[in-house]
Image (cartoon, rainbow, N blue to C red):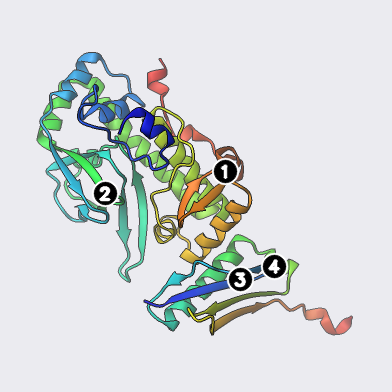
Amino acid sequence: MPRYYFHTCDGTQDIDRCGCELPDLAAAKREAIRYGGALLRDEPDLMVREDELRITVTDEDGALSCAIIILAVDGNLQKR
Amino acid sequence: MSQDEEKHSTRWEGGGSSSNSEGRLGIFVRKLLSHSRLSTDDQAAIATLPFSLRSMEPNAYILSEGERALICPVILSGFAYRQKTSADGGRQIVALKIPGDPLDFQSLYLERADHDLQALTRVELAIFSLKDLEQLVTPRPALARAVLIDILIEASIGREWLLNIGRRNALSRLAHLLCELQCRVEQIAGKRIEAFEVPLTQEQLADLLGLTPVHINRTIKNLEKRGAVQRVNRKLQIGDVEALKKIAEFSDIYLHQNEASKG
């Protein structure tokens, strides 16, 4: 099974050097979504401190496999 | 393994040689004594129970869901776990068993296994027949009580795990499990164990704590930064137990250790 690396960007960069063996890209993408969901469940303030949570998935060669990007947007942006 | 060799070992797995003065079943008796008071007569009676030895490799099935158990294995060395799986293959590790633990007192009372029981590491088991066990405890109320207490403590640990998975965040969730493991292992080992090597992989920790392996990896990193754990050759070791206890707000009340034997 190929190994995928899940890098987390939530204001700080968390580079994954261990990675995780998964059957294919679709499984890696699902894993990234579940991971992101768990991070938010654990710490909703993540999206208050930073407007963006980004999980970047790379393959064994370091090439981008996919990315999950979650954005928080304030509605009163135009009034400012 | 001699006492001296064990002292610096980080991979405590129980056991010991058969020349050990307390006998092969000593660790099992000590386990029962950790939560129940037993007369020397009762203790001697356990030692007379016939048993066979069986070694099993990691992930081997000791008992499968739906099976009717005729035996009760006790771990002499190594670690095992109970697991349940959902229809789509999702796995949850629902209990962790350590050296000295009886694995199936439940089958004294319930007919069919409701979960799988698997070896986590290589395990050495003492296998008793349920019939012998039943005949042993029936005329001995203190032993029957010890069996019940063992079952109740496992249920208590299960409740704590439910809280852990349902309500604690990843950091304190992992920290809490590590505190429990350290506590239980030191209790049965009867000594402090420095840098205890956690016998679970990141995938197994994920299946136990209801997190993804990636999240476990990040959480271990976080604990590492705080000096609470360290990774040596990809193996997770417990570092600063006090730091872990603080993170997990750990209280060992639910383990009910030594209450009966404190006297």
Q: Residue under label 1, please give it.
A: B244
Question: What's the chain of the residue with tag 4?
Answer: A
Quadrant in which residue B103 is drawn: top left
Q: Position of residue B99 (x, y in %)?
A: 31, 38
Which three-letter amino acid code belongs to the residue tagged 2? Answer: Arg
Callout 3 secondary element: strand
| Same subunit: marks 4 and 3 | yes
Q: Disc 4 and disc 3: Cα gap in Å?
A: 8 Å
x and y percentages locating residue B247 in the rendered image = 60, 45
Amino acid at pointer 1? Leu
Under circle 4, the secondary element is loop
Same chain under badges 1 and 2? The reply is yes
- Distance between the alpha carbons at the discs numbered 4 and 1: 24 Å
Q: Which residue is mark 4?
A: A12
Q: Residues under labels 2 and 3: Cα distance?
A: 36 Å
Chain letter for mark 3, please: A
Task: Assess disc 3: are there few (<14), some (14-19) or many (≥20) residues with their C-alpha within 10 Å of its C-alpha.
Answer: many
**Quarter containing the N terminus of chain B:** top left
Q: Position of residue B89 (x, y in %)?
A: 32, 69
Q: Are marks 4 and 2 on the same chain?
A: no
For mark 2, does the 10 Å Cα neighbourhood hold few (<14), some (14 to 19), or many (20 or more) residues?
Answer: some
Q: Quadrant of the C terminus of chain B?
A: top left
Tell me the kind of residue under disc 3: Thr
Same chain for the residues at labels 4 and 1, yes or no?
no
Front of the two marks 2 and 3: 2
Residue B169 visible: no
Viewer-side label of 4, 2: 2
